[in-house]
Image: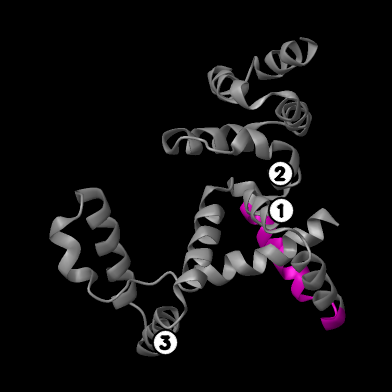
C-alpha cells in the first residue's frame, strides 16, 4: 500500500515539472542575479528559443495556466517540485516507472487509491514527498525533523536518503524515544556520523 500511495503523490510531482517555465519579467532581473544562476537562466532560455513554435506556444499556455493558479496551490506545487529535485536519481527513476504503472491501472482503481491518499493526514501526505523510503518512516521520524534550522535541513535530508532501510528503522525508534530537549543533539550526532560508522552509532544510541 505504501508504494501505491506514493504513486498518487507522483502525479503531483510530475504536474509541477510541467509548469517549470521561465516567468515573465525574468529578463529584467538577470543583471541582479548571481553569475551561476544567470547562466542557468540563459541556458534555459536558449533551449526554449531552439524549440519549434508550437512547443513554445504550449509552454506559454502552461505558464499562463500557472499564473492563474491560486497562491496556495502554486506553493504546494513548488514544494512538490523541490521535493522531487532532492530525491536520489534511483528513486526518481523508480518514481517515473511507478507513474507509468499507475496510469495503466483501471480508472476505478486509480480513483480508489486517490481517495485513500486523500484520507491521510496532511502531515503524512507531506511526509511522502520525501520518497518511498523515508516517507514510509515519516510518522516515526517526524519528531526529529520538527523545527530543524534552515541551514541543517538539506544536510539532514541528504543523510536520511543515504541511510539503509535498517538504519532508517533504528533512527525512527530513536526519534520516538528522544525527548524534545535532546533532539537537537541527536540530529547533530547523526550528521557527524560517517556512512561507515552510522549503523554502529545508531546501535550504541539504542543500547543506552
Q: How far apart, in angstroms, are the residues tagged by discs 1 and 3?
A: 33 Å
- Horizontally, residue 127 falls left or right of residue 84, namely right
The residue drawn where x is 43% and y is 69% is 20
- Quarter of the picture containing the C terminus is top right
- Horizontally, residue 102 falls left or right of residue 21, namely right
Assess whether residue 68 is covered by the magenta stretch: no
N-terminal of the pair, mark 3 or mark 2, is: 3
- Tag 3 near tag 2, CB within 8 Å: no
Give the magenta range.
92-108
Q: Nearer the viewer, mark 3 or mark 2?
A: 2
Q: How far apart, in angstroms, are the residues tagged by discs 3 and 2?
A: 36 Å
- Tag 2 near tag 1, CB within 8 Å: yes
Residue position for label 2: 138
* Dot label at residue 124: 1
Query: Tag 3: Cα neighbours inside 10 Å, few (<14), some, or many (≥20)?
Result: few
Display colour scheme: one colour
Give the percent coordinates (x, y) of residue 142. Answer: 67, 40
Please tell me whether residue 48 is drawn above or below residue 132 in the rendered image: below
Q: Main secondary structure of the magenta part?
A: helix
Name the image quarter holding residue 185: top right
The mark total stands at 3
Give the percent coordinates (x, y) of residue 64. Answer: 39, 84
The residue drawn where x is 81% and y is 75% is 110
N-terminal of the pair, mark 2 or mark 1, is: 1
Q: Nearer the viewer, mark 1 or mark 3?
A: 1
Amino acid at each position: 500500500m505504501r508504494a501505491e500511495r506514493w504513486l498518487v503523490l507522483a502525479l503531483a510531482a510530475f504536474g509541477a515539472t510541467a509548469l517549470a517555465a521561465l516567468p515573465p519579467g525574468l529578463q529584467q532581473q538577470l543583471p541582479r542575479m548571481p553569475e551561476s544562476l544567470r547562466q542557468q537562466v540563459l541556458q534555459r532560455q536558449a533551449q526554449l528559443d531552439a524549440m519549434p513554435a508550437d512547443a513554445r506556444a504550449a509552454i506559454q499556455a502552461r505558464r499562463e495556466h500557472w499564473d492563474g493558479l491560486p497562491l496556495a496551490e502554486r506553493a504546494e506545487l513548488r514544494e512538490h517540485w523541490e521535493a522531487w529535485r532532492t530525491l536520489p536519481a534511483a528513486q526518481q527513476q523508480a518514481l517515473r516507472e511507478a507513474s507509468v504503472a499507475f496510469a495503466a491501472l483501471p480508472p476505478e482503481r486509480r480513483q480508489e487509491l486517490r481517495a485513500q491518499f486523500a484520507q491521510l493526514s496532511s502531515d503524512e501526505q507531506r511526509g511522502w514527498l520525501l520518497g518511498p523510503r523515508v516517507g514510509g518512516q515519516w510518522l516515526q521520524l517526524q519528531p526529529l525533523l520538527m523545527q530543524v534550522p534552515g541551514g541543517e535541513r538539506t544536510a539532514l535530508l541528504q543523510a536520511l536518503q543515504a541511510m539503509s532501510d535498517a538504519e532508517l528503522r533504528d533512527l525512527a525508534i530513536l526519534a520516538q524515544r528522544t525527548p524534545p530537549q535532546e533532539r537537537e543533539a541527536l540530529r547533530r550526532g547523526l550528521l557527524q556520523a560517517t556512512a561507515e560508522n552510522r549503523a554502529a552509532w545508531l546501535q550504541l544510541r539504542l543500547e543506552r
